[in-house]
Amino acid sequence: MKAFKRIAFSLALTSIVSAFSIVSGASAVSPATPQEVPANKALIKPSDTDGRNISYHGSFHTRLIAGPLPISTYGTVPLTVVQYYPFSSDKPKLTYQFRNHSGTKASTKHHVPERYEDENYTITFTDVPKGTKDEPIFLYIENAVSESRNVNVNGYTSY
């Protein structure tokens, strides 16, 4: 009975986290208002920053957008990530890229096809574009596999 209660609690918690991470009702993306994201995409604002870095956490199916990256952060930027499917040993196949919403300024995409839950993994981007107030740079995290289940992620830059 205790195991059932734990599973039920975990599923309820996952549903609550998912509900809070999805932003809906917008039809266009505007660099001036990064909280406006198409309905099936999640936007995570930095949960912690020292003015040069961002950190994020969330759960999503298709795409998560974190940021914006501070304007003074560009060039070589290490990103430490954790990514995993809850209640599964399957390996997520995620792609990480720093870019503006229109995609005209973008770093190289980094593919991370592994599970990192009890440990983290650091990607070093060497070509993060410089953002501006009118055209900020965000971290786009995309699931390379069409999934009906959430992948959990968290991470931070260390510029």
Image: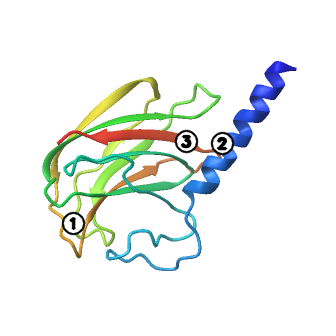
- What is the x, y in percent for residue 87? 65, 29
**Few, some or many residues within 10 Å of mark 3 (<14, 14–19, 20+):** many
| Towards the viewer: 92 or 100 | 100
Going 83% across and 25% down the picture, which residue do you hit?
A: 4
- Give the mark, 1 or 3, whose residue is nearer the N terminus: 1
From this view, report whether residue 95 is shown above or below residue 81: below
Q: Is residue 47 left or right of residue 1?
A: left
Q: Is residue 35 left or right of residue 134?
A: right
Nearest-to-viewer mark from 1 and 2:
2
Going 23% across and 76% down the picture, which residue do you hit?
A: 134
From this view, report whether residue 112 is shown above or below residue 146: above
- What is the x, y in percent for residue 110? 30, 44
Q: Amino acid at mark 1?
A: Lys
Q: Which residue is mark 3?
A: 151
Could you say which quadrant of the image residue 80 lies in? top left
Return the mark for residue 14.
2
Q: Amino acid at mark 3?
A: Val
- What is the x, y in percent for residue 54? 30, 48
**C-alpha span from label 2 to label 3:** 11 Å
Nearest-to-viewer mark from 2 and 3:
2
Going 26% across and 36% down the picture, which residue do you hit?
A: 123
The quadrant of the rendering that contains the C terminus is top left
**C-alpha span from label 1 to label 3:** 27 Å
Q: Which residue is mark 1?
A: 105
